[in-house]
Amino acid sequence: MEKLNVYFEDKLVGYLAKYENKYAFEYDSNWLANGFSISPFSLPLKKGVFIPNMMVFNGFFGVFADSMPDSWGNLLLDRYLKKNGINHTNGLTRLSIIGSTGMGALEYKPNNEMKDNFNFNLDRYQEEANKILNKEDSDIDYLFKFGGSSGGARPKVLINIDGVDWLIKFESRFDFQDFGLCEYEYAKACEEIGINIPPVKLFESKTNSGYFGVQRFDRREGEKIHMITAAALLEADFTSPCLDYNELFKLTKIITNDNIADLNDLFLRMCFNVYAHNLDDHAKNFSYLYDIKNKIYRLSPAYDMTYSNTYYGEHTTSVNGKGIDITDDDLIVVGKKAGLKLDYMKESINKVKEIVNRRLGKYLK
């Protein structure tokens, strides 16, 4: 495949085309007249063909890479392609298979999405996921149908239940026992702190303490919301440390037009990640949603706010230049540079500490 059309709400946004080892993009003329920039820094709303300068996202601009799966979804996609005898593919072919099922609102046509119908069962999905993680034979069509476009390293599904769109996570072989319950309790702690977080639920299981589910915030009353990660906005490699919270605050100030509610919420998230031991706070774990009515990007609700480690034992996004031994003063320095009020920051730090210790102390021993 050499060309792919990009859509938003059935409106043609533009065109992706293979150019040497990269993928060029050009806006459609009607979108230039009536649309918005889908990636403000890399793809400003103007005529011309855009070609990535780097290979951070395998030759794509970051906003299109956001539609692609990460490690788990890529594992399923690779197995699905192999099963169907498709051995030589480029990125456009992979995007066409994602079609309209990716995160966010962008869709890709012509699409080659799987159309089969399956009866979904949480415990069965975990069973099939365990098989593929253990390199055993598994029902790859079943796995790919529900989880082929999902991001992150952990098995997960994107599914509509009684009219509500959910993202539900499953255990990997590297998780500790009751990991789903842990993430649920972390999310409820965020909720008490006042962090903007979507509704969450612990789905019942017959084999473990439950599966953690979160309502999708890129879906609202049947409509898709355009979403872009910080990694995509900055064309930054989120798989390694590439960001400091000082830079993340600066990005948020610019992209949201200095929205104080978003800046305050980001401060709470930074404090929570530090005191609740969420070291995997990488650049793809912060996103922005486009508000069509007000024509502005806003910080998305928080996600992946749970206990996590990194192989090097430090935060992926540093705090005031530090990945470990982060102090209250470091948090305040970052917030001060972002223009936050000192009283708010001190009050927030104390609130986060108290709630984290009370609700999550058993995970932090």
Image: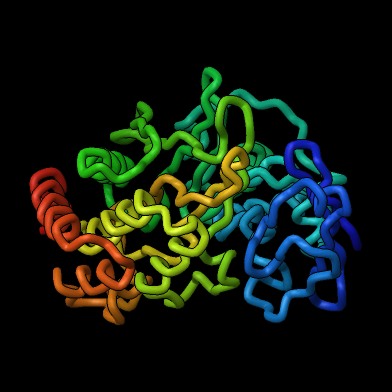
Residue occupying image coordinates x 49% and y 48%: 155
Residue 318's spot in the image, x, y percent?
A: 33, 75
Residue 252's spot in the image, x, y percent?
A: 45, 61
Quadrant in the picture for residue 242: bottom left
Quadrant in the picture for residue 71: bottom right
Q: Which of the colour schemes (rainbow, by chain, secondary structure, one colour) is used? A: rainbow
Q: Is residue 168 visible?
A: yes
Which image quarter holds the N terminus? Answer: bottom right
Residue occupying image coordinates x 33% and y 42%: 180
Residue occupying image coordinates x 86% and y 48%: 30
Residue 105 left/right relative to 1: left
In this view, the residue in front, 178 or 159, is 159
Residue 76's spot in the image, x, y percent?
A: 63, 51
Residue occupying image coordinates x 62% and y 26%: 222
Residue 210 left/right relative to 105: left
In this view, the residue in front, 88 or 47, is 47
